[in-house]
Image (spheres, grey):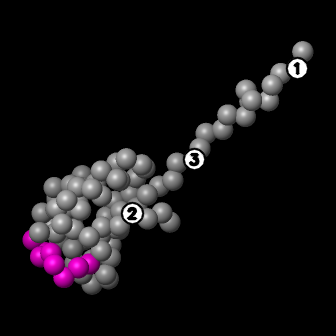
Amino acid sequence: METSGSFGSTRRKRRTRLYLYLIDDDFNSFDNVMYALQTVLPNCNLLLAEQMAMITHNAGEAELYSGFGNDVYIKYAQLQKLGLNVDIRTK
């Protein structure tokens, strides 16, 4: 009795990690950026938000968050809605 090869060839697709970056701009104040980061990102307190704003200001961009799929896209949309310039990348 022959078996079809389709039963054993079900491979799972590897999920890719997405990275959320904050891009420096001249429109938002430090207070606005810190408020947005504290509101959207989990475990982001005032000190961490201030550090991320300073890193972004000095380096031009900073990695804010990483995750898989919908979680990153939701945070991306929330930060854009608050007026920040953000970008999603893969490494």
Q: Which mark is residue 14?
A: 3
Judging from the image, what secondary structure is the residue with disc 3 in?
loop
Magenta segment = 24-31
3 vs 1, front mark: 1
Answer whether residue 16 is visible to the viewer in this image.
Answer: yes
- Which numbered disc flags the more N-terminal residue, 2 or 1? 1
- List x then y, in percent, for residue 80: 23, 62
Residue at (35, 67) in percent of width and height: 87
- Residue denoted by label 1: 2
* Mark with earlier residue (2, 3): 3
The type of residue carrying mark 1 is Glu
Q: How far apart are marks 3 and 1 (CA)?
A: 30 Å
Crowd class of label 3 (few under 14; some 14 to 19; many from 20; radius 10 Å): few
The residue beneath circle 2 is 88
**Residue 89 among those drawn in magenta:** no
Give SS at disc 1.
Answer: loop
Q: Position of residue 4 (x, y in %)?
A: 81, 25
